[in-house]
């Protein structure tokens, strides 16, 4: 029995009938004017109903997604709780909040800088979006490439809104990041002579995508997690931070944790803090499915914002153009951009190409939404419509065995549900993938709050308002290492005053004065559980 419905099979026949003529077709890219028009009319970031203007905090008067606004303007989990902040449970130089790739990189470099380090994480070490990243990590380390070219690609892809000094750090330290990971033991794809295999991604002018088949993030996380363990860095699992602590002078001075095992609050005093809590995909903005890990609920943004750290581009969200639209068991999961970079084409229900397969992610997502809505060229799938990603083209172009070699994880994932993507196309639709905006930092990864550093997806500004494929795995390494190094340096020169939660009380008073209820909506309550149900 086929894994597809009768309507899907009829449409698939049209895809198969046009495959030969599409095989070597020249596909034009959209002009700049066409891209702008597409985004404004069809990208979810331009939907007025999906956003709310903040009434309190450093970004008062700016819009953010309504689901994020409910958390930023929500009540503290410590409201009404009496804590003895002089009873210190953990006392360290550097506290790292988050156990993904950014947190692990930061912890390793902080320890190397001579600091005592504690990592705390909501779930387990490695339970993070880093593990979910598939396609690759960018770095300009080939003779025909340069950090300057990488900069221009990312700057254009980010709609020229990237913070220049952050982007410069990202691209110039990219080759060093690859070298560091390789020496730690990350098994990048290589030719028989040892040369690293690189491919294109959407919006790149050079082949600079380094990969570990199609489980690049998992391989990087495996190595980083092992390194943290091997170096004896202490890790508290299932112990999320719920509020930052400041001292009397306003310096970041630690955090309050909630220990899931004992259901007790724990006080951590730290001379510096690194926030590496990841993204917000599990808030399901505008009802979209997500490719994100269960722990991605914007925790770091909420804690830092309440402490006074401003956000940047919080209204810019990345919807990956190719999320799984069928079957239901893997709905919303990521279909890596690498599938398109090695030859798969996006086609509509009639088997027609409607866009270049390697447009930037925001433009591709908008184009897919247009094809499925106003053009009526979608295929009915589950509760909505979807389009085809014609994967059999890959082996027609590159030979039998290419899919098993280059995207084995994707092949296995679909095979579980009776779909062979070597022979059958797959159905996709945009999925909520990445938080382009986040906490504002400088090139040292430090925020406006002295002693508070941020790395990874919780950061805003590096990628502008649209990130190119492979630059997120790069930024967790580059800025994770920077944060660790700079936090360790700052800790040596820091003397802390008395610990305080006065900023939490002040924020609550500001909410009251603004008439903000601070109550979470019933819709969000099951989502914002700090990942507790994922255990």
Image (cartoon, rainbow, N blue to C red):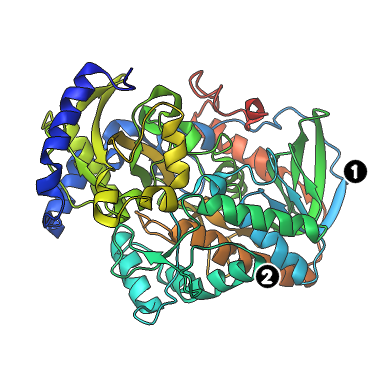
Find residue 402 and name its label.
none
Residue at the (83%, 58%) spot, across then down: 232
Looking at the image, residue 375 sits to the left or right of residue 427; the answer is: left
Percent position of residue 449, x then y: 62, 59
Q: Say which label, 1 or 2, has the lower sequence index.
A: 1
The reply to whether residue 436 is in sight is no
In the foreground, 528 or 356: 356
Find residue 87 and name its label.
1
Percent position of residue 190, x then y: 48, 67
Specify few, some or many for label 1: CA neighbours under 10 Å numbering under 14, 14-19, or 20 or more.
few
The reply to whether residue 268 is in sight is yes
Is 169 drawn above or below residue 217 in the view shown?
A: below
Give the residue pinned by disc 2: 485
Percent position of residue 167, x then y: 43, 69
Secondary structure found at label 2: helix
Looking at the image, residue 79 sits to the left or right of residue 173; the answer is: right
In the foreground, 244 or 159: 159
Is 217 drawn above or below residue 427 in the view shown?
A: below
For discs 1 and 2, the disc positioned in front in the rendered view: 2
In the foreground, 32 or 396: 396
Secondary structure found at label 1: loop
* Residue furthest bottom as drawn: 143
């Amino acid at each position: 029995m086929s894994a597809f419905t009768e309507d899907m099979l009829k449409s698939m026949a049209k895809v198969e009938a046009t495959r030969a003529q599409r095989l070597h077709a020249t596909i034009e890219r959209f002009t700049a004017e066409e891209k702008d028009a597409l985004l404004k009319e069809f990208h979810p970031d331009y939907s007025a109903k999906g956003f709310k203007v903040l009434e309190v905090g450093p970004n008062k008067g700016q819009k953010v997604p309504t689901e994020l606004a409910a958390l930023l303007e929500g009540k503290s989990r410590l409201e009404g709780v009496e804590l003895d902040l002089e009873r210190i449970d953990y006392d360290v130089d550097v506290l790292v909040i988050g156990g993904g790739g950014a947190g692990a990189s930061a912890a390793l470099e902080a320890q190397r800088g001579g600091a005592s380090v504690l990592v705390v994480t909501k779930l387990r070490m490695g339970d993070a979006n880093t593990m979910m990243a598939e396609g690759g990590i960018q770095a300009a380390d080939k003779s025909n490439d340069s950090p300057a070219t990488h900069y221009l690609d990312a700057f254009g892809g980010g709609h020229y809104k990237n913070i220049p000094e952050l982007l410069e750090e990202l691209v110039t330290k990219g080759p060093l990041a690859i070298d560091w990971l390789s020496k730690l033991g990350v098994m990048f794809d290589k030719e028989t002579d040892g040369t690293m295999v690189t491919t294109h991604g959407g919006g790149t002018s050079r082949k600079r995508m380094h990969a570990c088949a199609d489980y690049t993030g998992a391989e990087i996380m495996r190595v980083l997690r092992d390194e943290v363990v091997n170096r004896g860095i202490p890790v508290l699992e299932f112990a999320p931070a719920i509020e930052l602590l400041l001292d009397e002078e306003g310096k970041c001075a630690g955090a309050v944790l909630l220990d899931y095992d004992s259901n007790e609050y724990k006080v951590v005093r730290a001379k510096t803090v690194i926030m590496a809590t990841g993204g917000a995909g599990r808030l399901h903005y505008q009802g979209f499915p997500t490719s994100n890990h269960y722990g991605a609920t914007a925790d770091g943004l909420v804690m830092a914002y309440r402490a006074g750290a401003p956000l940047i581009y919080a209204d810019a969200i990345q919807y990956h153009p190719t999320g799984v639209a069928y079957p239901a068991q893997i709905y919303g999961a990521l279909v890596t951009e690498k599938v398109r970079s090695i030859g798969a084409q996006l086609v509509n229900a009639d088997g027609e190409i409607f866009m270049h397969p390697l447009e930037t992610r925001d433009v591709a997502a908008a184009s897919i939404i247009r094809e499925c809505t106003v053009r009526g060229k979608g295929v009915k799938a589950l509760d909505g419509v979807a389009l085809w990603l014609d994967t059999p083209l890959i082996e027609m172009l590159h030979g039998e065995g290419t899919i098993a070699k280059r995207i084995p994880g994707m092949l296995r994932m679909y095979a579980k549900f009776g779909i062979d993507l070597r022979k059958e196309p797959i159905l996709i639709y945009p999925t909520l993938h990445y938080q382009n905006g986040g906490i504002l930092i400088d090139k040292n990864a430090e925020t406006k709050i002295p002693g508070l550093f941020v790395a990874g997806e919780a950061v805003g500004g590096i990628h502008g308002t649209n990130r190119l494929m492979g630059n997120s795995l790069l930024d967790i390494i580059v800025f994770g290492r920077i944060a660790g190094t700079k936090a360790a340096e700052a800790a040596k020169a820091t003397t802390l005053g008395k610990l305080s939660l006065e900023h939490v009380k002040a924020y609550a008073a500001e909410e009251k004065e603004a008439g903000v209820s601070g109550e979470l909506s019933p819709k969000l309550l099951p989502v914002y559980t700090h990942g507790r149900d994922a255990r």
